Image (cartoon, rainbow, N blue to C red):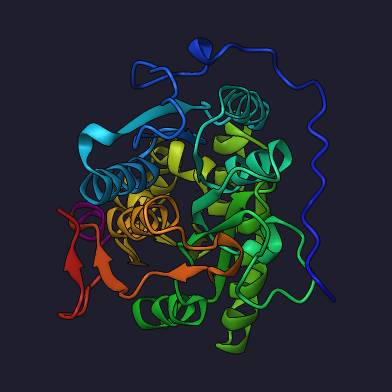
């Protein structure tokens, strides 16, 4: 079955101007058509280390490939509000940008809803088939969409739980129910963990308002907690740690930013490198004229076992020698 993109129905779309959406760079006027310069709109869902690194890597690669003087970035942050993503992407379309970078799944969904013609590159998106409701996803979205995925091997993350906590019995999977890719990850990891002999339970929070209460419930009923690559969890890592560390419950995280805030260990990628890969794709589209409809989703080439020194020491977790300390 050929792909179908998700028809987004974001109720009550905000009528925020771009200035109200957390801009981190002064908005510049779109480049004039045909003058050899390009305007790229960047919609980032929320500010946290992983997404920030992906945006920076993208911008660095684009400036290197196109020449810094030849590219203007309209960089906007949606403050973890999908409706703001919709407003931002709609404004990018109105201004006639040459390409949109959608950093995280809600940003990608909003961009896809906003335009079927302007090239869209996603990054920090875990599973494009899930994010865009594509049947029988084969690795290429088609149309005006491509990008990079931050999906780490989920079976290896489950194996990390077994390696570090072989005597644990119960694993709580903590995630935001509003993030489709988080649901995909915990459902998948749950199967791997159950195959390894663990009893698993899902603990979902809706948004930042119930992170603390749900984390407490998870800690009360779990020997270990697993958190997938999840933007809301990343933005609330300190709040999660304020519950989990005093409770003595270790966390294995899906990415380094979450691990640095509340986790003991992770199997993670470099989000900066992921952004660089996305930026190189943008150069191929804008400068070389490559057809985005034929560009397959690209994945991180390397995964590294990392650990949080302070939390590992505080919780008395023995870390094998092949893990790298998070600096």
Most extreme residue toward the front is 34
Residue 314 lies within the magenta run? yes
Is 253 located above or below residue 240 in the figure? below
Q: Main secondary structure of the magenta part?
A: helix
Horizontal arrangement in the rendering, residue 5 relative to residue 229 (left or right): right
Side of 41 where 66 appears, left or right: left
* Magenta stretch bounds: 310-315
Quadrant of residue 74 within the rendered picture: top left
Tell me if 234 is positioned left or right of 204 in this view: left
> Against 112, is 208 above or below?
above
Q: Residue at x 46, y 77 (%)?
A: 153
Residue 135 lies in magenta, yes or no? no
Residue 198: percent from the left, percent from the top? 58, 80
Query: The N terminus appears in which quarter of the rendering?
Result: bottom right
Where is residue 248? Give x, y as percent.
Answer: 38, 54
Q: Is residue 236 visible?
A: no
Left or right of 2? Residue 168 is left
Percent across and percent down for residue 316 are 24, 64
* Res. 216 image quadrant: top right
36 relative to 284, above or below: above
Residue 146, how many percent across, how many down? 55, 59
Residue under the image location 28 percent in, 53 percent down: 272
């Amino acid at each position: 079955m050929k792909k179908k993109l998700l028809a987004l129905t974001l109720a009550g779309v905000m009528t925020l101007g771009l200035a109200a959406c957390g801009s981190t760079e002064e908005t510049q006027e779109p480049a004039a058509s045909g003058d050899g310069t390009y305007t790229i709109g960047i919609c980032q869902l929320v500010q946290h280390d992983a997404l920030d690194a992906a945006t920076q890597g993208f911008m660095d690669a684009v400036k290197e490939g196109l020449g810094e003087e030849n590219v203007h970035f309209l960089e906007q942050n949606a403050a973890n509000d999908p409706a703001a993503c919709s407003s931002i992407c709609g404004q990018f379309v109105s201004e006639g940008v040459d390409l949109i970078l959608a950093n995280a799944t809600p940003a990608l969904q909003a961009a896809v809803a906003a335009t079927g013609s302007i090239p869209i590159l996603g990054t920090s998106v875990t599973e494009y088939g899930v994010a865009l409701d594509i049947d029988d996803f084969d690795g290429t979205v088609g149309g005006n969409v491509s990008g990079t995925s931050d999906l780490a091997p989920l079976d290896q993350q489950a194996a990390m739980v077994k390696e570090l906590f072989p005597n644990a019995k119960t694993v709580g999977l903590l995630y935001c129910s509003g993030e489709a890719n988080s649901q995909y990850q915990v459902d998948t990891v749950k199967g791997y963990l159950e195959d390894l002999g663990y009893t698993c339970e899902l603990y979902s929070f809706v948004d930042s308002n119930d992170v603390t209460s749900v984390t407490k419930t998870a800690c009360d009923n779990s020997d270990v907690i697993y958190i997938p690559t999840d933007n809301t969890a990343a933005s609330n890592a300190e709040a999660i740690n304020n519950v989990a560390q005093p409770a003595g419950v270790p966390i294995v995280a899906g990415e380094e930013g979450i691990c640095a805030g509340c986790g003991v260990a992770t199997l993670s990628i470099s989000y900066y490198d992921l952004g660089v890969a996305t930026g190189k794709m943008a150069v191929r589209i804008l400068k070389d004229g490559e057809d985005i409809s034929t560009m397959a989703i690209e994945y991180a080439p390397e995964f590294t076992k990392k650990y949080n020194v302070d939390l590992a020491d505080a919780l008395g977790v023995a870390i094998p020698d092949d893990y790298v300390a998070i600096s």
